[in-house]
Image (spheres, rainbow, N blue to C red):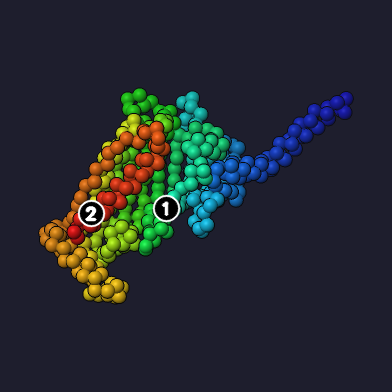
Amino acid sequence: MLRNLKRPYKIVLGIVIVVIIFRLLLPSIVKNYVNRTLDDLPGYVGHVDDIDIRLIRGAYAIDTLVLKKRTDTSSYPFLKINHVDLSIEWKQIFKGKLVGEVILEKPSIHILAETPDPTQEPSKEHWTETLKDLMPLTINKLEIADGEFTYLDRTTSPEIDLYIKNMRLTALNLANVEDTTTTTLPSSVSLSGISIGKGNLNLDMRVNVLKEIPDFDMNMKLTNVELTSLNDFIKAQGKFDVERGDLDLYSELKLMDGEINGYVKPFIQNLKVSDWKNDKEKEEGGILNAAKEAVIGLFSKVVENPKEKQIATTVPIQGNINSPETNGWKSFVGILKNAFIKALNQGIEGSVK
């Protein structure tokens, strides 16, 4: 009789031991799975340092995720995230919706200017599948704390290094689980950060990310940027130096059904082009270079408003990015990049023509 009673206890004990062993092995299993998923992304190699499983919360956490292009010989990985938390968004469970939330701590993205090799670049489907493998639930909430975005161009002279640090982002209702029948842009995104030159970046956007090319309505402002911090960019694009000045940049953009409309508007205040007489580097460049800088300095003073000392210009942005021969998002990024460069060039060069 006692022997028969002990049998169920042994079975339960065996099950408990198996569960404990599985729980101990689970982080390693998930870590290997995540590393394989990152390595399967065409043209990239990635790894994570550690995985922590939090079963009660329905979550798992990643410590130090790194993703780097296989062809990249620089010391800058394309993506590095100190900590990632992926979990169920519990408050949506009570509404009958099973969706997830992702929190990224100290993510950094480095974009290197280069001519992309189409055979090495993953498609949108590759990125989507990788994200689904890492987060099986549809992401409804995304938060970023202390993020960094850097654009590096080593093909220019001088080289260009632009960045935004201390980025904070909150994106809500990405999966459109709320009652948003009255709007075509159900999700909200807010972003803030500090740019090169101690500028303050603020962005607010309504968006519909469920479309292949998301619709959005965005307002952005970048204020109090010290222009001297952009001298490498100005030298590469405008071929002269700035000794003093502040930049405010404003933009409104709307993308609906592939049609983009909006503008970029820079305001430049208290501009002063470098004094060629005191610039030893320019003196070493010879009399022609010195004469050029003298003319630039002269005309910058002529066109400045003596009362406001403010220079402004507006660059419209219009176009269709739905051409079947082109990649929609690459077209959008190209239009945006060219418009911003044009706006800065017009705002700066327009002041010294």
> Can residue 200 be seen in this snapshot?
yes
Whole-number angstrom distance, CA of label 1 to CA of label 2: 23 Å
Residue sitting at the far left? 307
Q: Amino acid at mark 1?
A: Ala
> How dense is the environment of label 1, judged by Cα within 10 Å: few (below 14), some, or many (20 and up)?
few
Circle 2: element type: helix
User: Relative to the observer, which residue lies in front, 160 or 237?
Assistant: 237
Q: Position of residue 261 (x, y in %)?
A: 27, 37
Check the image and report above or below for 118 versus 3.
below
Task: Name the residue tied to disc 2.
Answer: 347
Reply above or below: 147 against 188.
below
- N-term mark: 1 or 2: 1
**Marks 2 and 1: in contact by CB < 8 Å?**
no
Q: Is residue 43 left or right of residue 311?
A: right
Considering the image in quadrants, where does the N terminus appear? top right
Q: Is 134 left, or right, of 283 in this rendering? A: right
Picture disc at residue 113: 1
Task: Name the residue rendered at 32%, 50% in the picture.
Answer: 201
Residue 200 in the image, given as x and y percentages of width and height: 31, 53
Residue 88 in view: no
Between 39 and 223, the residue placed more toward the observer is 39
Residue depicted at 41% across the width and 58% down the height: 155
Q: Residues within 10 Å of mark 2 (few under 14, many from 20)?
A: many
Can you tell which quarter of the image residue 299 is in?
Answer: bottom left
